[in-house]
């Protein structure tokens, strides 16, 4: 019997000190009256997605680990700065709440470009969508546009003037585990960026 496909993606992990800083900002909102209208990302799951793959044959995990190692060799370590907040699709009808990436976009873009060749060789179609680096922190459950708008406003107010920085020195292949509560992300392999 064949193994079920795995939901995989490539991402830069967020280090523990930055996850704590994010939790400090989000905690009061999540615990407040608006917090119940969102599904908050667990802080241990915070990451900056570089390339989403979707459902993948588990037999490709080894080749994908090689692809991430190859991509990492061509990208130097870079600084990431998180600042500000926003929502997709927009601030009036937010469904996904995020923290912005004020610095480090070039490094994330370079990783995405370096992955395209090895992924094409494995049969993955190119990802031509424009990249909008962000750190997803919640998905809204609000049935009212006014409630979800207020949630977005609360996040923007909490992050006004807030900054958090870290050195992105690795990229990982992650697997998403669904069921039994919120999603959990497991790093299958990790590759260090070029020094």
Image: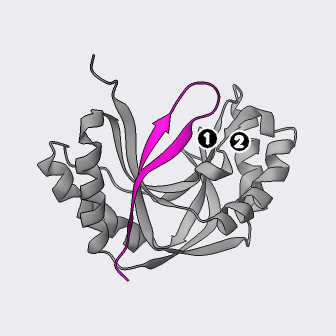
Picture residue at 73% right of the left edge, 65% below the top = 21
| Magenta-drawn segment | 173-195
Judging by the rendered image, the residue that carries numbered circle 2 is: 149
Q: Is residue 132 magenta?
A: no
Q: Residues within 10 Å of mark 1 (few under 14, many from 20)?
A: many
Q: Residue furthest top?
A: 1
Relative to 80, is 34 above or below?
above
Relative to 23, is 32 above or below?
above
**Residue 149 placed where, x, y %?**
71, 42
**Residue 178 placed where, x, y %?**
53, 29
Q: Secondary structure at mark 1?
A: loop
Q: Secondary structure at mark 2?
A: helix
Picture residue at 38% right of the left edge, 57% below the top = 131
Q: Is residue 80 left or right of residue 153?
A: left
Q: Is residue 176 visible?
A: yes
Judging by the rendered image, the residue that carries numbered circle 1 is: 94
């Amino acid at each position: 019997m064949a193994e079920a496909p795995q939901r995989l993606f490539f991402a830069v992990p967020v280090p523990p000190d930055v996850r704590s800083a994010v939790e400090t900002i989000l905690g009061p909102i999540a615990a407040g009256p608006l917090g119940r209208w969102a599904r908050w990302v667990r802080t241990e799951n915070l990451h900056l997605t570089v390339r989403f793959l979707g459902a993948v044959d588990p037999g490709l995990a080894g080749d994908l680990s090689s692809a991430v190692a190859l991509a990492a060799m061509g990208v130097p370590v870079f600084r990431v700065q998180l600042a500000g907040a926003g929502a997709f699709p927009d601030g009036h009808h937010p469904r996904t709440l995020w923290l912005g990436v004020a610095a480090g976009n070039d490094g994330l873009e370079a990783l995405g470009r370096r992955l395209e060749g090895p992924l094409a060789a494995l049969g993955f179609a190119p990802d031509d969508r424009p990249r909008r680096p962000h750190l997803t922190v919640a998905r809204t459950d609000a049935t009212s546009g006014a409630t979800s708008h207020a949630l977005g406003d609360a996040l923007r107010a909490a992050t006004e003037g807030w900054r958090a920085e870290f050195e992105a020195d690795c990229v990982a292949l992650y697997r998403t585990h669904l069921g039994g509560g919120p999603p959990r992300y497991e790093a299958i392999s990790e590759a260090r960026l070029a020094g």
